[in-house]
Image (cartoon, grey):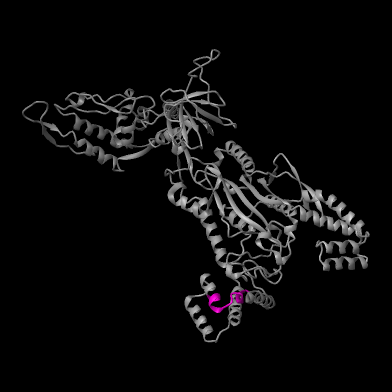
Amino acid sequence: MAYFTKYPKIRYPFGGQSTSTAFQDIGVYIDLVDRVKDDASFYTEYPIRSGDRPDQVSQTLYGTPDYYWTFYLMNDDIKLRGWPLSDKAITEKAKREYPHKVLVTRENMTGRFQVGDIIRGLNSGAHGEILRRRPDMGQIIVKPIPNPEPSEEEDPTAIIPFEDDEDAESIRIVKDADQETIGSASMKIDRVVDEYNAKHHYENADGDHVDIFPRAPYVQRFKIPISYSPTSHFYINVNADPLAGDSVAIYFNPNLATSATNPTPDATTIAGIIAAEQAILVPQFTAYGSVPALTQALVDLGQMTTIEKATYDGAAAIGQLTLETLAEQIALATSATSVSPLKNFEVNTTTYAIEDTSDPADGVTSAGAWLFDLNKDVTLSTFDNLDVDLTLNQANAVSLLGNLLPGASILQLLFVALQLIEGKKATGLPLSLQEFNVFFTAVFGLQQANASYQAAVLALFSDIINKNLPKYQTSFTNDILDNRIQAEFEYFFIVDKLVDVAGGADVSTIGTVVKYTADDYTAADEDIPTQTVTFTNLAAANGNTITGLTNYLVSILQLTAEQAAAYQAAETAGQLDLPTLIGQLAFGAALAANPPVTKTYYKVLYSDQAIQSGSSETITIFDQTGALVTSAVTDFVSKDDAYDELKTIFDAYITENYDDLEPALITPVTFTERYIRQNSSLKSIKVLKPEVVQEFDIQFRRILGKSLAQEVISKTTSQGFSSYSAIPDDPSSIAIPSASSSTSSGGSSY
């Protein structure tokens, strides 16, 4: 059966002939080939196996090796790039074309280590010339060379390899591109790999190329200012000035059916808080002296409109409103507004409300809670400097400028944290450290913080409280922010090349630093014996009686008459003796004469393990009974030392687990793997069906084989390109190139 029809001739002027010659239309074969390779009835698919030669495939399909040339006509990729190589040959090709070493670094390459520079490995002593740089992949391609200035003992031809081990190599320029000997700062190298095995690019699940952040993995720090509130009962801040933006009534007893997220105090509690607020607010409002002065203050604070001010001022001017009446009305309105599930009994929305923290998961088993200081900034360190803080708004601006990759979980952390904190400010509800922990772990894909990590944090905060018992035991009516235990809670975590948290913030890759202060009473403790002697001598000089001693102290204004009377009454009742009084007086005098020294420390956790500083110092603190005791502190005294300790641990972890920290959402593709993929894409080819190939051969010869034709036949070279040769006029004498003209394994070009 004939599948093809006879094709027309055209007249064509050959060479310098003045007349044209009738000649078979050489271009018509294109129509023949296109018709065949695009019509599924003419061809079928065939998978080339590793090592298959074209003539072998032809023999397998057609019983003859002579039709191998049809594969090149039917498959454009093979025609352009050559026959696919064997698996072994493609690997050898990659090694041959990418024979150098790649030094992988996370450091900034801008303006450093240029093409042509001669470098030396500080650990290995190896030398190399920089051939190329790929800053987007953090790669420096180096040709290893002998030492350009060998010593007498060195072999001048020896090439020392760059090291790739857990210690990590570092490099330094020894000669620049102009061969000038220079000194330069070193650059840390995370990996040394053969060029053919180096990463060419990254791909997502769809096979698309993905940009990565070459400075990753790196360590990021997230800092939250917090304070500890020891009380669980409502109280009134007697020092509050609402017109200066202070809070008035903000705490309540959590046992009265209240919670941080849905405060619903009973009517008795609300009435008590309102009455207490009235007692404070009315005198503060009336202290302004006149209705216009009070209303102007409220206008300045945004608590009253100018129209309302004009109304109140006008009523006062005609005697219809007194300052006291207005003060009571405003105080009542303020209280009524504050006592609500949203306002949580407060006037100013940035104040701090307590929540029920009886749950041990809150970090400390006490009546109080560690709360955010919402007036201070939560900060995120920059990617290249742990010591530089960005507020969340600044970090957001940096990311929007394109300095961080969009869609990363770090940005999600920023956005959600901003929303959470601003939302808390707007409602006036507190934001506890436990609440933020829940949010923090949720962003990182954890359902619940690791139990051992929680226990470690519990122990950490318990120790901080124990070193600050005077503040922890502050009376409820004096629980204001300035009197609280202050701290800064910092998370350290690894960020991967997509600016996501590496490993989903697994506890094994989380570090914690808590900055806190402790009051050292060592000077007071050392002064107590001296003060004891002083008061013992005063007692001896005044009859060695409590009455004599206390009366003398009243006379020199060291005691009030009321205090002296109380001591004397206690003596009469048999509740106090002179040695005990002398001890109390000496204790108090030593404390008054020697204010405590506030010292700053940094507690460090890596995972759930406490990291000690390696040195210790002794301070004097109060114990649970109110006595002064010595306490050994092994925490870090320097922020830099605390940061450096964690950074060293994280760097070692990154070096050891470098490849395991690759983002799960993307896949690295090496130079060799890229070649293998391209080679594999050639292995499924179109082949003419056996019943078609002979007719195709006849028609193809007829088209190309007419008289005077300068026939062109595709001839495979070892590089996979085509060469051309003239063939005779007689189609029967056309010699189809033999299969031996092709290489045994092909010659793909990439």
Q: Find residue 122 and report its horizontal and vertical position in percent.
A: 55, 26
Q: Find residue 11 and report its horizontal and vertical position in percent.
A: 10, 33
The residue at the far top in this view is 152
Given residues 254 and 180, the one toward you in this image is: 180
User: Residue drawn at (43%, 22%), measured in percent from left and top?
Assistant: 179
Q: Which residues are magenta?
A: 284-295
Q: Find residue 1 and report its horizontal and vertical position in percent.
A: 24, 38
Location of residue 57 with respect to 284 vertically, above or below: above
Q: Does the rendering let one see residue 400?
A: yes
Q: Is residue 291 magenta?
A: yes
Location of residue 86 with respect to 486 vertically, above or below: above
Q: Does the rendering let one see residue 446?
A: no
* Left or right, residue 571 beside residue 604: right
Using the rendered view, name the quadrant where residue 143 is placed.
top left
Q: Find residue 358 and report its horizontal and vertical position in percent.
A: 71, 62
Location of residue 352 with respect to 508 vertically, above or below: below
The residue at the far left in this view is 18
* Left or right, residue 256 beside residue 197: right
Using the rendered view, name the quadrant where residue 560 is placed.
bottom right
Q: Is residue 181 magenta?
A: no
* Number of numbered discs: 0
User: Residue drawn at (83%, 66%), measured in percent from left and top?
Assistant: 563
Location of residue 128 with respect to 641 vertically, above or below: above
- Quadrant containing the C terminus is top left
- For the stretch drawn in magenta, the main secondary structure is helix
Using the rendered view, name the quadrant where residue 706 is placed.
top left
* Left or right, residue 295 beside residue 574: left
Given residues 98 and 300, the one toward you in this image is: 300
Given residues 35 and 644, the one toward you in this image is: 644
